[in-house]
Amino acid sequence: MNLDFEDEWYGWRLRGRHLVSDDGQRMTIERLRGLMWRDKMELRLKGFASRRAAEQARQTASRRQLVKVVVVQLADVRHRGMAAS
């Protein structure tokens, strides 16, 4: 069975029992299952039920970052010579 993928998988091919990456690396079904199992166990250790939950947590964490606002008088900056120009 030979199959060439398109869109996001462009360059990847299915050749017999192997999924072949765009750079030529061959992966068997067992290897893919092992990678998926490892990913699942890493998520479980971090306390997430799925990859989607982990990605949503990462997105909400990045949105919650606090911003520190510093107000500086322009005359003080010019007087002390710390201006960039």
Image (cartoon, rainbow, N blue to C red):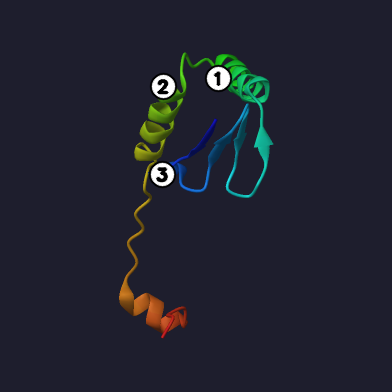
Within-10-Å neighbours for mark 2: few <14, some 14–19, many 20+ = few
Residue 78 in the image: above or below residue 4? below
Residue drawn 63% across and 26% down? Answer: 17
Q: Amino acid at mark 3?
A: Glu
Residue 39 place in picture, x, y as percent: 59, 23
User: Of the residues under marks 1 and 2, which one precedes in the sequence?
Assistant: 1
Frontmost residue, 6 versus 8: 6
Residue 9 place in picture, x, y as percent: 46, 42
Residue 60 place in picture, x, y as percent: 36, 32
Within-10-Å neighbours for mark 3: few <14, some 14–19, many 20+ = few
Residue 61 in the image: above or below residue 83? above
Numbered badge on residue 6: 3
Residue placed under numbered mark 2 in the picture = 53
Residue drawn 43% across and 32% down? Answer: 58
Frontmost residue, 74 versus 52: 52
Within-10-Å neighbours for mark 1: few <14, some 14–19, many 20+ = some
Residue 6 place in picture, x, y as percent: 41, 44
Report the number of discs: 3
Question: CB of mark 1 within 8 Å of CB of mark 2?
Answer: yes
Q: Amino acid at mark 1?
A: Leu
- Tell me where residue 5 sits by quadrant: top left
Residue placed under numbered mark 1 in the picture = 43
> Could you tell whether 18 is left or right of 6 in the image?
right
